[in-house]
Image (tube, coloured by chain):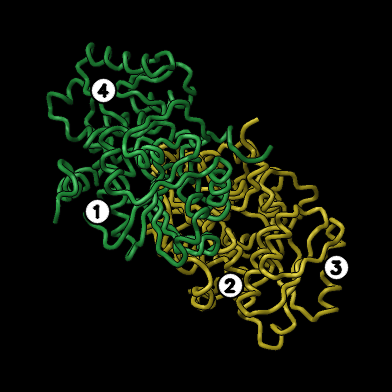
Chain colours: A green, B yellow
Amino acid sequence: MSLIHATISAGTIREAHQRIKPYVHRTPVLTNSTINAITGAEVFFKCENFQKIGAFKARGAVNAVLQLNEQEAKAGVATHSSGNHAQAIAYAATLRNIQAYIVMPENAPNVKRKAVEGYGAKVIPCTPTLQAREDTVKQVMNDTGATFIHPFNNDHVITGQATSAVELLEQTEGLDRIMTPVGGGGLLGGSALAVAYFGENCKVSGAEPKGADDAYRSLHAGKLIPMENPDTIADGLLTSLGDKTFSIIHTHVEEIVTVSDNEIIDAMRLIWERMKIIVEPSCAVPLAALIQQKEKHKGQRVGIILTGGNVDLDRLPFGN
Amino acid sequence: MSLIHATISAGTIREAHQRIKPYVHRTPVLTNSTINAITGAEVFFKCENFQKIGAFKARGAVNAVLQLNEQEAKAGVATHSSGNHAQAIAYAATLRNIQAYIVMPENAPNVKRKAVEGYGAKVIPCTPTLQAREDTVKQVMNDTGATFIHPFNNDHVITGQATSAVELLEQTEGLDRIMTPVGGGGLLGGSALAVAYFGENCKVSGAEPKGADDAYRSLHAGKLIPMENPDTIADGLLTSLGDKTFSIIHTHVEEIVTVSDNEIIDAMRLIWERMKIIVEPSCAVPLAALIQQKEKHKGQRVGIILTGGNVDLDRLPFGN
């Protein structure tokens, strides 16, 4: 077998899977006859919205935190995020009984702050700019010696995220394709590696909001083109690829499909109404892409990773 | 074994279960660590919101429709309902390729009418009074010879609804109690019979909105006291018990717990936020009752039947 990735091997992924198994759910795979009829494909939904902390991010964070040696662990872990990665790191820190430091923009919703503090993490507010966020994390690391765990541009995180696709391949025979959303690319990159190592005649695509289409443009340009002013309802996908995730995705992902916010909302509504499960807008992006491109995938077996279910019920994109 | 029910035996329920199995889902049982922590009990949720047509009502309707002889079936089936029973009868009729006639108040939401028509059923509008509803159904039966299938006061329907508790007992060992909502009492009555035949040291309780508490008052009075002006957000539980369901519930249900609409909304929100699944307000009533009475059930294994997930996403009881 030719070299698929320099540092993340099939063995690395298998070991990560064993490492995190006691602390994450083996989430179920659901199907829905109405959605099959609409898409003309057989769709298998891997429900990471039922994962610990309500999102796949628990996998990568747990894998990264469990890899720290005793001395590193003692000083704690740090990250900047107001989203699912923040909760995931906070949760992972509880497993080793260590301190998590979460740098969060001061305008982040109170509910997100409370969710993280609920795990015993320390929230450090900062002004809501990328510069302030990075400066504040550096300060925290200097003050505490905590290890920074990047939300996606980190081998341990990518490897952890890969385990969802590993399970999906185990749970569903003969998949022709796996589709995931793409933001920073940790899940898409990890899934692409999982399929490269463990899939058989299975392709991988990413699905991305038109309003945050840096992966689409970067893949076409053959180089990283970060997004300047992302604007989409899929608030988990505002981030741009990093160098590590770009390099995997560039090599192992067949295509990136972009969809509008209206397509995302329609797909999200379809999942809520027909499957009776709660998914985030970001989570509905691959189904939106599949519906848009349904002629291409007719009759195929398509796995979709439903990434998370953390929505603010007081601000839903339905009704008036 | 003493006589538990004159016409619905353990064998009747087992036969019904075999009869409907090809046409309904064996729904999963989910647990949630946060809800266990809040209630102090171990709670096992039987997810009938994932059932065909999005509610347990598929079980009773399919059982009743499959019991019709060839001649009866040819003339079709009729019922009056704007809710899940209407969809369930419409779905069941498709299995025998027969006509369903659904009498529905003319002010019923368009989406409910369309859902029923989507199965090929004929919708007959009537003025929104009980009298008009019953008169219209009689007219339909006269005109067509269709068999009327009552939403709950019907042995075949009660027997079909019993199969959800049968599965819950199979899927979960050592349950101390099963709780269901109570409206007309088909599910509660069926569950009580299932537990009487197949449970071991398992009790049954019903949970009811304070604004539609006819079962509570009827059980205390020892006779049927229909509700005059029910008023609750749990729109699946507006109906009063019938004589068949009252007699079962009076004998085999330990207690009825009543809860306020605020308690129902809080419990519904808890299920949405923590379990990431969509349930109707009616469906959250037993969890609201368990939370209200948590001292009584501490440390016990409690099964809750989540009855359905058909909500109008444009009119949710969250937000402002």
Which amino acid type is marked by label 1? Ala
Q: Give the residue drawn at x 18%, y 26%.
A: A73
Q: Amino acid at mark 2?
A: His
Q: Quadrant of residue A131?
A: top left
Q: Looking at the image, can residue B51 be seen?
A: yes
Q: Residue furthest bottom?
A: B71
Between residues A84 and A241, which one lies in front from this camera angle?
Answer: A241
Under mark 4, the amino acid is Gln
Q: Chain of mark 1?
A: A
**Disc number at residue A99?**
4
Mark toward the viewer: 3 or 2:
3
Residue at mark 4: chain: A
Which residue: 48% across, 22% down? A110
Q: Which residue is mark 1?
A: A196
* Dot 3 amino acid type: Thr
Asked which secondary structure carries label 3, the reply is helix
Mark 3 to mark 4 CA distance (whole Å):
68 Å
Q: Is tag 4's residue or tag 1's residue first in the polypeptide sequence?
A: 4
The residue singled out by tag 2 in the image is B5
Q: Which quadrant of the figure has residue A199?
A: bottom left
Q: Earlier in the sequence, mark 3 or mark 2?
A: 2
- In this rendering, do the residues under marks 1 and 3 share a single chain? no
Q: Position of residue A253 (x, y in %)?
A: 32, 49
Farthest residue, direction front: A221
Q: Is residue B82 left or right of residue A189?
A: right
SS at badge 1 = helix
Q: Position of residue B132 (x, y in %)?
A: 87, 62
For the point 15% across and 24% down, which residue is it?
A: A72
A94 on left or right of B221? left
